[in-house]
Amino acid sequence: MPVSIRIRNVTTLIEGSLSVEVRNEIRKTLSYIIPGYKFTPAYKYAVQAGRKWDGSKTVALLNKGGVPGLTIPTGLASYAREILAAKGVPYEISDERLVTVPDPGWSTSGLIMRDYQLPIVESALKKQRGVIKASTGSGKTEVVVKIMVEVACFPAIFYVTSCDLLLQAKDRFSRYVTHNGLPAKIGQIGAGVCDIQPITIATVQSCERVLTGKYTKYTYDDYSSDDKTEFSDPQKNAIREMVKDAKFVVFDECQHCSCETIQSILNESHSARFRFGCSASPWRDDGLDLLIEACFGRRVCDVTASFLINSGYLLRPFITFNHFNQSLGDFGTFNAHYEAFVSDNVARNQWIAERANYHVSQGRPTIVLVKWVKHAEKLQPMIPGSEILCSSGDSKKSPKKRKEFMDAMRERKLMCIIGTSLMDEGVDVPAAGAGIFAGGGKSSTRELQRVGRFIRPDPADPDKKCAYIEEFYDHSKWLRNHAKLRRKILETEPAFEISDNNISLSL
């Protein structure tokens, strides 16, 4: 008897008699290592019990009700099929997903697709799920708009992780989508609004609070998502129904989808046959990439920044790693070390301000990226006319105010922004021609996202021919290794011009 593979939108059931060898290989292949597992209660308990545990956890679970076989996320079903085929195990596929029927009258008005985008749309329509890996500036949102309108199965939800991205995405969808020849009304869940439409842009925080009663702060350094929209009971019921009935779901910046709460929201959409994640860097530095594929499936495409630069769609960045050698003492904790060598480093901050003021004097809108608000507050008086964009602390700005400042830079009315980590992902400011990455860090995903902020052409400035990036190579404990990691990921893009500069500092 062949093994039966029953495909559903969220999970796939593998039913039938599997040998211990095959079952264990599937479970091992569909497993990951829990970050920091040696500090978990489970590890401590294993040690006390005299058992060895390497921190691995599988997403291939034994079927319930005594039915022989495994239950796995549908996004990983292809791995199981490959193992069965390699082991010579015959199987039959039963697709139990409901067939979708397109809603007539929807189109994309004024949306002109680039040559490389059309094959992505075609592949996505064929596969019906997957990860759209495409560099910042590749037009991922436009690709999603085209796919969503071609499918035309609603409700459709476009999830984002911040109010800033919500407003930006809503503007892009509103620009292109029409229904029966008229501009389509795009819905919004979050940033103080509950307006459900066939296509709705939603912050994951709003949906999480409604579905689970929890609120997870997606915190990166001093950035914490600040969408705390309160909903009435009727609105909560409507949101639950929207999530439950969704036929098409997309998650922007899908590298965050290893989070258990995000997975639980996506898994509530049992009717969603079409599932896509989008990111310029859809991987995890903590090794949880498998959980991203579990939500969506394998990659639909891989559009690199170098391809877009060589094709003329993006600008070449000139990245200078500025080397700082200072003896400021030894510190017992990372935060104390970071304060001395980065945020409170007078000479380093003076150099940052000098470079920012120089780029501004050359007519380049400049963004200085830092980790901590207090670092931004130290730099602002040193950079005349600059504004701080953050979502916490005394300098906190509302999403509306942050949009006003970013619009001002887009119009060149504001020439320098000092931003915390909220500007690491998705924010589109093509006017910015110079970036100073003053905060350091070791995240490979953030590093590529940061560079992507600056290499977009600016339609309002035909003289913008390239981008200038000031990076830091701090030769000190911890920070040295972080710089190595950032440089390593940048070197994967052949079109990035990378150089070094040794800084002589006097304290």
Image: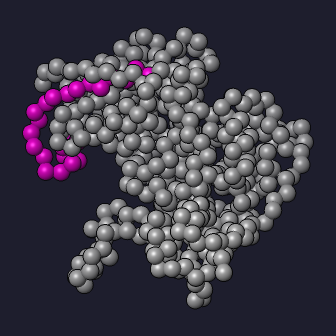
430 lies above or below 464: below
Q: Is residue 26 above or below residue 221?
A: below
Viewer-side residue, 507 vs 430: 430
- Type of colouring: one colour
Magenta segment range? 317-339
Q: Looking at this view, is 353 or 10 the one in front?
A: 10
Does residue 147 appear left or right of residue 220 in this picture?
Answer: right
Magenta segment includes 268: no
Q: Nearer the viewer, residue 155 or 221?
A: 155
Q: Residue at x 89, y 45 (%)?
A: 105
Q: Residue at x 64, y 67 (%)?
A: 10
Q: Whole-percent x and y of residue 256?
A: 49, 53
The mark tally for this picture is 0
- The answer to whether residue 402 is seen in the rendering is yes
Rendering quarter of residue 56: bottom left
Q: Quadrant of the N terminus?
A: bottom right
Q: Position of residue 242 (x, y in %)?
A: 72, 62
Please tell me in which quadrant of the rendered image residue 507 appears.
Answer: top left
The answer to whether any part of residue 197 appears in the image is no
**Residue at point 15% right, 28% down?**
325
Q: Who's the residue at 56% across and 36% down the image?
A: 303
